[in-house]
Amino acid sequence: MKASRISLMVLSLAAAPAFAGDVDLSLTNDSVKGQVNFFNTNNDVQLGTGYTYHEGGRDIFNADFHAQGRTAIGNLPTTAGIGMRGIFWDQSRADGGALGLGGFATVNIPNVPGLSFTGGLHYAPSILSFGDSDDMTSLELRGSYRVIRNAELFAGYRYLNTDIENSSRDVNLDEGVMAGMKIFF
């Protein structure tokens, strides 16, 4: 079953260039994630969808919608987005999801062409959560270096956590140091 899920993700990513702004593939020690964003940073909106397979049979799907634009933090050119991320997770004994509100920012470092730092945070309180999730927090931090005009490599940290409804325990759905690549179209 694990091989068929990964094969489905690879086929989906192979078809993505026909309609994508970028394709992102990242790995942690316990998971693999593919993300397709449909528009580039010059558009006023960003739509994206992703799939994460976490070791042990946990599937995590996300759909993103953000208003985005160019701005500056200090004198550093920045692309920022504000919006929402819908997350649905499923494993053998439990499933759930949430609609997290938040955003992201990518700061480019002009003194080192190709170097950028991105941070994204989305939070869903219990009113925006369903299934076995009582709330959800999604955090991603990364440093990227654009190796060529249409591809970059990155490393960072990903954290996705939910509290389990009617329980005092929480579950780290996906957490760890990550590395990956992004290809722009």
Image (cartoon, helix red, strand yellow):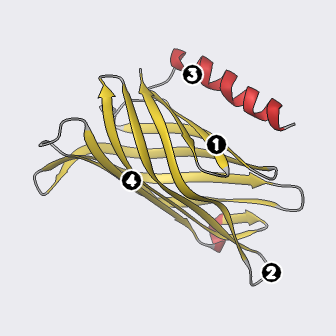
Q: Nearer the viewer, mark 1 or mark 2?
A: 1
In three-dimensional space, the C-alpha distance between marks 1 and 2, rounded to whole angstroms, equals 30 Å
| Label pair 1/4, CB-CB below 8 angstroms | no
Q: Position of residue 83 (x, y in %)?
A: 45, 52
**Residue 32: which disc?**
1
Disc 2 target residue = 166
In three-dimensional space, the C-alpha distance between marks 3 and 2, rounded to whole angstroms, equals 40 Å
- Callout 1: helix, strand or loop? strand
Vertical placement of 12 versus 2: above or below?
A: above
In three-dimensional space, the C-alpha distance between marks 4 and 3, rounded to whole angstroms, equals 23 Å
Precedes in sequence: disc 1 or disc 4: 1
Q: Is residue 24 left or right of residue 110?
A: right
Q: Is residue 77 left or right of residue 15?
A: left
Q: How many marks?
A: 4
Disc 4 target residue = 104
| Label pair 4/2, CB-CB below 8 angstroms | no
Quadrant location of the N terminus in the rendered image: top right
- Callout 3: helix, strand or loop? helix
Q: Position of residue 7 (x, y in %)?
A: 75, 27
**Residue 16: which disc?**
3
Foreground residue among 72 and 150? 150
Q: Amino acid at mark 4?
A: Phe
Q: Amino acid at mark 1?
A: Val
**Residue 127: which disc?**
none
Q: Residue at x 75, y 50 (%)?
A: 55
